[in-house]
Amino acid sequence: MENIIRERRKALGLSQEELARRCGVSRQTVNAIENDKYDPTLSLAFRLADELRLTVDELFTPS
């Protein structure tokens, strides 16, 4: 699954650490998702989308 988390996070001026804190995960988890090495759970995908002010469909696309 591909995503635009890095681009959106940077556009909002958030660090990986800050986004991770807001979503209740580690910075390493955010890094792994951004680098397409880990697919988040559905609940985490919704938390990420909420924090990044997008829908899950806007944030993630099938690869």
Image (cartoon, rainbow, N blue to C red):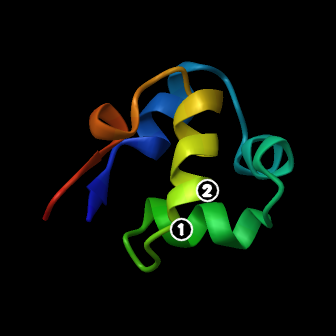
Picture coordinates of residue 2, whole percent (x, y): 26, 58
In the displayed structure, does residue 37 sit left or right of residue 18?
Answer: left
For numbered disc 1, what is the local secondary structure?
loop
Residue 8 relative to residue 19: left or right:
left
8 and 39: which is toward the camera? 39
What is the distance, in whole Å, between disc 2 and disc 1 at their CAs?
Answer: 5 Å
Q: Which residue is mark 2?
A: 44
Looking at this rendering, what residue extends furthest in the bottom direction? 37
Residue drawn 47% across the image and 77% down it: 38
- In the displayed structure, would residue 51 be above or below residue 30? above
Residue at 52% from the left image edge and 35% from the top image edge: 49
User: Up-down: is 54 above or below 43?
Assistant: above
Pick out the residue farthest to the left.
63
Q: In the image, is residue 18 above or below residue 32?
A: above
In depth, the one of 29 and 54 nearer the eye is 54
Residue drawn at 53 percent across, 20 percent down? 53
Q: Is residue 42 above or below residue 59?
A: below
How many C-alpha atoms fall within 10 Å of the one at disc 2: few (<14), some, or many (≥20)? Answer: some
**Are circles 2 and 1 on residues that touch, CB within 8 Å?**
yes
Q: The residue under label 1 is which amino acid type?
A: Thr
Q: Which mark is residue 41?
A: 1
Q: Where residue 47 sits: x, y (%)?
A: 64, 43
Report the residue that reaches farthest toward the front.
43
Q: Quadrant of the C terminus?
A: bottom left
* Count of numbered marks: 2
Q: Secondary structure at mark 2?
A: helix
Graded by Cα atoms within 10 Å as few (under 14), some (14 to 19) or many (20 or more), the crowding at tag 1 reads few
Identify which amino acid the numbered label 2 is placed on: Leu
- Residue located at (46% from left, 43% from top): 5
Quarter in which the N terminus is drawn? bottom left
The part of the image, by quadrant, that contains residue 50 is: top right
Q: Position of residue 7 (x, y in %)?
A: 42, 35
